[in-house]
Image (cartoon, rainbow, N blue to C red):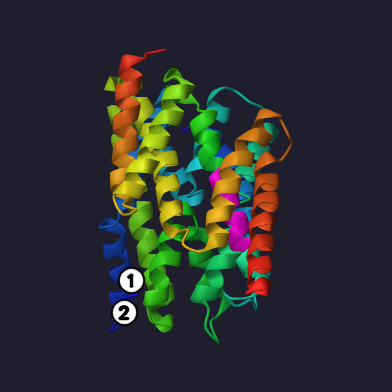
Amino acid sequence: MADLTPYVLLVLIGFLPNEVWRALGLVMARGLDEDSEIVVWSRAVATAILAGVIAKLIIFSGGALATIPLSVRVIAALCGFIAFLCAKRSVFVGVLAGEAALLLGGYLFAG
Amino acid sequence: MPKTATFSSPAAAFFGGVRSALTSVFFLVLAGTYIGMGALAHDFGFSPVWLALSTVLIWAAPAQVILISALGTGSAAIEAAIAVTLSAIRLFPMVVALLPLLRQPGTRLRALLLPTHFTSVSMWVESLRLLPAVAPEWRIAFCNGLSFGYMSTAAAFGFVGSYLAAGLPPLFAGALLFLTPMSFLMSTARNAVALIDRMALIIGLIIGPLLALFHVGLDLMWTGIVGGTIAYAVHRFREAAA
């Protein structure tokens, strides 16, 4: 019989602690409309949390990304964002430019 | 804004959503992110089937990365669960902000269960962008199709990554992991048209890492509450002044 432990852990440690916030959102969102002040505030909070996640992924990287120097990661992100602005806010151009800068910097300044 | 999109049936709206998913930039982003995730799962000894199931059940890349690396490095279960739940707090305000776009008078709670589970960064960003141009009665089906398209893409490329993992050099594996923050950053910036959204983005980018640097507990939650509230206060102040 296959070992089911990783699947039990997936549900208990992965699924439930993650899903609880969605369920809470569903309960709290009842009766609110999209222009209500709490929804406007919630959207700003979600955006700020997302921004925090983005910055942490770049600055406190894990795995293979941690082998690329911090300065290269931050400068590559800035290059991507500048390209994004120059290309009429094209997500595709921004991501591509950031990746190109990361690969170049990672190659030249291997840690 | 383009003219309002209407559909002939719920199935047509669903497939309209699937098509939007497969032709958006997030298709490439999810493909890259989940190839990276497949490589990570492979490194820590998780099967591709396990990864696919985690994609369907968790459906949040940061939580999946945390779960895989925590279990893989032998962290205590409770510690891993706390890290996962902290990373998932952002889903709460996302659901609160999304559901009013989907709900109509008379919408049943169970019709909102799937969109609630499907709520994640990619789907949320694209839903807020696309849904206002979809006729209200088709929004739930469209949103489910959009999410189904994204989730299938992610699950499929997780398999690709698991099988590629053996041969990927670290620089390229790192570049794949870099896709997640890059794509999240650009897509959030594209959506941030109003001052309140731009302020929330900028303040979050600054105080998020600062709080983490000083090991403030629940740093992401505080980033959201402080950053979001400052942005909201400035927005209210400007409205009152206008």
Residue found at x 70% / y 46%: B222
In the image, what residue type sits under mark 2? Ala
Q: Nearer the viewer, residue B239 or B33?
A: B239
* Residue B159 spot, x, y in % from top left: 32, 38
Q: Quadrant of residue B234?
A: bottom right
Q: Which residue is mark 2?
A: B5
Which residue ends up furthest to the top in the rendered image?
Answer: A111
In the image, what residue type sits under mark 1? Phe
Q: Which residue is mark 1?
A: B14
Q: Mark 2 — on which chain does it sit? A: B
The image quadrant where one finds the C terminus of chain B is bottom right
Magenta residues, start to end: A42-51
Compared across the picture, whether B217 is left or right of A43 comes to right
Report if residue B165 is visible in the image: no
Residue found at x 38% / y 31%: A76
> From what the image shows, is residue A111 above or below residue B119?
above
Q: Mark 1 — on which chain does it sit? A: B
Q: Nearer the viewer, residue A75 or B37?
A: A75
Q: Secondary structure at mark 2?
A: loop
The image quadrant where one finds the N terminus of chain B is bottom left
